[in-house]
Amino acid sequence: MGEEEKFTNAVTHRKLAVELFNHTWDLMEKKDRTTEEDERMVHAAHASRFHWGEVGEPLNLAVGEWQVARVYSTLRRPSSALRHARRCLEIIEESGITGFYRASAYEGLAKAHSVAGEREKSEEYIELAKAEGRRITDEEERKVLFDQLAEIPEYG
């Protein structure tokens, strides 16, 4: 494979990863999803993560895992939500990523544990997310994090 072809493939993977991520997010925010749209959302999230796996940095991989976990939490599928939320945190920890993205990894685990009916574990990760979140200097990122935490029944 020539350099030009590798570059073209990288550009294609990146473009698809972003478009599928955004499509997944649009489906997650849709109020009255059909069963078919639920499954499309699962497949789009996994496809986005796949394409990031081809060209992304650890942060992209972690965010991809976070989104897959969020999809499964949204659909109330705790075992898959927990699996991907744990993988997100592993990538974050291995890469030394802090701030918003580490706090979001904790939020993803809190949400997944909540869906699993594991209140104490959910509360534990909420506290970790809040502690990390208080160190976030970007006001918009901090607001996004705390808004997402507020969606978890154990928050507060």
Image (tube, rainbow, N blue to C red):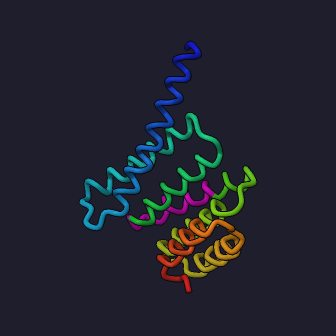
> What residue is drawn where x is 28% and y is 55%?
37
Locate residue 155, reporting x and y percent.
Answer: 55, 82
Residue 76 falls within the magenta-colored stretch? yes
Q: Looking at the image, is 139 positioned above or below residue 91? A: below
Locate residue 103, reporting x and y percent.
Answer: 64, 66
> What residue is drawn where x is 64% and y is 42%?
57
Residue 81 falls within the magenta-colored stretch? yes
Query: In the image, which residues are magenta?
Result: 75-88
Residue, far top: 2
> What residue is drawn where x is 45% and y is 65%?
73
Q: Looking at the image, is 42 positioned above or below residue 131? A: above
Q: Relative to the observer, which residue lies in front, 94 or 8? A: 8
To which quarter of the image does residue 58 belong?
top right
> What residue is drawn where x is 47% and y is 62%?
70
Q: Looking at the image, is 149 positioned above or below residue 87? A: below
Residue 56 lies left or right of residue 95; in this view the side is left
Q: Looking at the image, is 42 positioned above or below residue 50? A: below
Kindly report the secondary structure that dominates the magenta region of the rendered protein.
helix
To which quarter of the image does residue 125 belong?
bottom right
If the image is split into quadrants, where does the C terminus sit?
bottom right
Locate residue 146, reporting x and y percent.
Answer: 56, 75
Q: Relative to the observer, which residue lies in front, 23 or 70? A: 23
Residue, far bottom: 156
If the image is split into quadrants, where does the N terminus sit?
top right
Residue 86 lies left or right of residue 26; in this view the side is right
Q: Relative to the observer, which residue lies in front, 49 or 16? A: 16
